[in-house]
Amino acid sequence: MDAVLEAVRAGRTGETALLVRKLSDAERRGLLPELQALRKELRAAPWETRPERSYPALQVAGAMCHSGAAAAATWIAGADMRWRQAPADTLLKVLADRDTGWQADVARRLAARPVSADVPFLLMAGLVRRSGCEVPVTDAYVVGWVRHIGHSWGRVSLVDRLRAEPDLAPLVTGLFELADLGEVRWLFGEGPGSWQSALAELTGAGVLERKSVVDACVARLLRGGGPTDHRIFLPLLGLLALTRDEVRERVADWTALARDAASPVAAHAQSVLAGLALDGGLTPRQLAEASEGLLFRAEKKLVRAQLVLLGKVLARDASAAAELLPVVAQAFGHEDTQVQERALKLVERHAKRLDGEPAARSEAVRSEIAVAAERLSPALRMRATAVPGIAPAAAPEAYEEVLPPPPEPLRLPAAPDSAVALAEEVSALLAADGDEDVAAFERALDGLARHAHRDQDALREALEPVAATRWWWEPEPHRRQLCEERFGHTRRGLLTAEGGLELVLATLYGAVSTATLLAGLRSGPADHDCARHGFSRVLDVRLRELAHRIRTDPQPLLLATPSWSTGLLEPAELVDRLDAYRRLGARVGEADFAQALLRVRREDRTAALAAAGRASALGTPEGERLARRLSAGAPALPANGRRTSGPRILVESGEVGELLADFPEAFRRLGRAFTVSDAVRYCYHWGQENHRHWLATLPELREIVAVRLVHDVSEAAQDDGRGMAAALPLLAESGGPAGESTHLCVAYGLGARHPEDRLAAVDALLVLAARGQLDAERLGADLGQLVRRGAVKPLRLAESARTAAATGANATIWEMLRHTLPVLLADLASAGSTGTAGASGAARGLGELLSVAADCAERSGARGELPHLSGAAARRGSSRLAVQARRLRDALAVAEAA
């Protein structure tokens, strides 16, 4: 047996097989524990020194020694064997002496493994062939087969390779049933020579049963899935060229696909249904059922095409009016008013045909249409009153603006009194991977400080399960050296919130020396001349101070822990904490106290002045500083100035004198003047910042934060960055005046590339409006300039505006767009007077903005004229821009007349 283990360790696969073959069954069973021990040893070896050459021989030896099929399959497909497997023909050779039932069982078990197990197809296929069992149609087997066929290059065509497959029918069936086609998508190809072309040819030749292939293809499209599904199976369906009878047999399938499938599949199903309807192959009831779901789809092209089809059928068959007009009326609720108008025109044109129906039936249909008409836009609802018998039942109510209530800040609970509970919170924060909640983070820091002051041994015991999973836990010298380098040199990057927790934990377990902690604390600001990210430096110095104090002089608590989720600290609480420090004789941390001063609430002057008196009575230097700050009130905001950088509009600000005095250097840079060069200059620690921590640093001075956020948020609109606008709702919830920079941040967010960023900007807009802090005129004017310069795309802005208006904020959005549109309409008029190409560029996306504006104006009863609108409304044709401009003009005229 020692000879076998020696051959395995040396990676001599052939020799290993010969030696094991000579062993008896009992000897093989006796060898298994030693093979398992060797496998465990190899697993535990460091990745960089792991002897990979041993694995093929180990896989062969284990497969030969296991007598049970389940154990043998588990051994062969082990995750650690995946990267260096024995050749499939070698495994087949050493297993050839097993009975066919055993081999069939192993084949089925290997095929049942997930695709990610990467079991060799040739091994599974060889076992199936030798045992004579049915081919196992599993994802792993089918994916392996597709890869094998696709990689079998040569002069033999794909069609001939498939034709030669003895189990072609069940494997093709399995192909249609694969859970995920992403593993083999690139093998399918397109056009002649592709899998789709080959399968269609084999179906046409009778090699594959046509009905089975068609049914499987349609069923796969019905099942849905990602883009890969319809890119493979929709072309195949087209190549199969279904006959009229085959199409008619599947009317229910086309109906379901038109309602719910991905857009390309729905378009195909709609075209099939349209062909049937125009050829008399659909009853009015079937067409109505197909239209019901389709008219609610978001794709306007599909909805318009279906309305055109319904119009053709209604014109051809008068008796279909009672069945189809209620379905047409469902489009009255579509968000696009042009779709609503198309539907209303159909009802206007064909409503008289209901007179030929029995009285009860006609009355019921008209009543149903009347109820649907209540969802029309105000202008179209008024127009619908002229249609006999379908006037909306409910008169429009007087408009009342409805804004979502602003979120209320949450009171932070005290830090966990139990070290075990604290450890759970720290674990959750580390698992958040940079997406941690600021309030939870601050609470955990306070808990770490309190428990480190109370009993560090108990804290270490509670945190050990968490610390043992961190990269710095291993005692190897090179890891210790790496820990010293990463935590000691700020040139490697400022600490993030997660990195700060790592530093505190590493400090508790002695993974960082005291000298390194002190050097990291002292070496900061001069090495980081990046004004844009002064907030990151503030967090960095706070975290380094906490780690150093835990090692040298633990603090009883943290002064800067917020009282509220917004980052605000109640002045009375801060006085109580300073009093606790005084009674304990504890030394106040410089960075901790500086952050506490920046967070303390001063807007409530009664509470601030009362706390100032108590603070002064403490008789400590910190108490006197707090008293002076609370008595001084809010500082004056610095003067701002606008500058441009390419298509961007950025903001510069002057100094904040209050932040330049009596604060540590890391904090004073927040009060320095901020210029455009600071905003656009690259710094090596970009990408490490968390904007939510910025807002919690200055919770009553949001403009100081916003001026530094403008460039970052602009990347969401200009550079298609993702997540750059995520902090906008918190910016809106923060304290202090909402000035130029705050509104410019929201403007960029409304034009962000990604929907989640646009939604965050909409939330921020609504919060500002609900708090009475939104300057719609300023925001609208900013948007006009950003769209004009190309920094914001009008289609994205229109989508954001429509989303905000859908919450009930029609008057707010109209007031915003009322100051955006004149800028763009003026550009349109100017471009139209100089050349059609310029006019086309200026008009791009403007129709959608006009549509949203018209919606809001109609619903809110807006009044007055809009500069330059008449010129756009006078444009000829039925372009979306011209139609919506006329609609907005008419809405404002109706309101003015009213």
Image (cartoon, grey):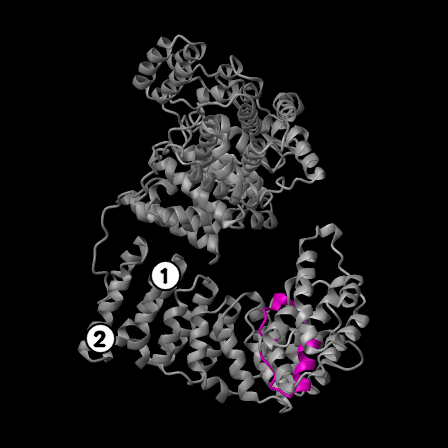
Q: Which residue: 50% across, 30% down?
A: 456
Q: Secondary structure at mark 2?
A: helix
In the rendering, which numbered label is found on residue 491? Answer: none
Stretch in magenta: 111-137
- Percent position (x, y) of residue 118? 66, 68
Is 518 above or below relative to 274? above
Of 729 and 444, nearer the camera is: 444
Is 659 inside the magenta-drawn segment?
no
Question: In the figure, residue 609 lies in which quadrant?
Answer: top left
Q: Quadrant of the C terminus?
A: top left
In the rendering, which numbered label is found on residue 340? Answer: 1
Q: Residues within 10 Å of mark 2 (few under 14, many from 20)?
A: some
Is 609 above or below relative to 500? above
Is 128 inside the magenta-drawn segment?
yes
Of 745 and 355, nearer the camera is: 745
Q: Is residue 704 left or right of residue 776?
A: right
Q: Is residue 359 left or right of residue 85?
A: left
In the rendering, which numbered label is found on residue 362? Answer: 2
Is 748 above or below relative to 607? below
Q: Which residue: 38% across, 52% down?
A: 887
Question: In the figure, residue 523 lies in which quadrant?
Answer: top right
Amino acid type, label 1: Gln
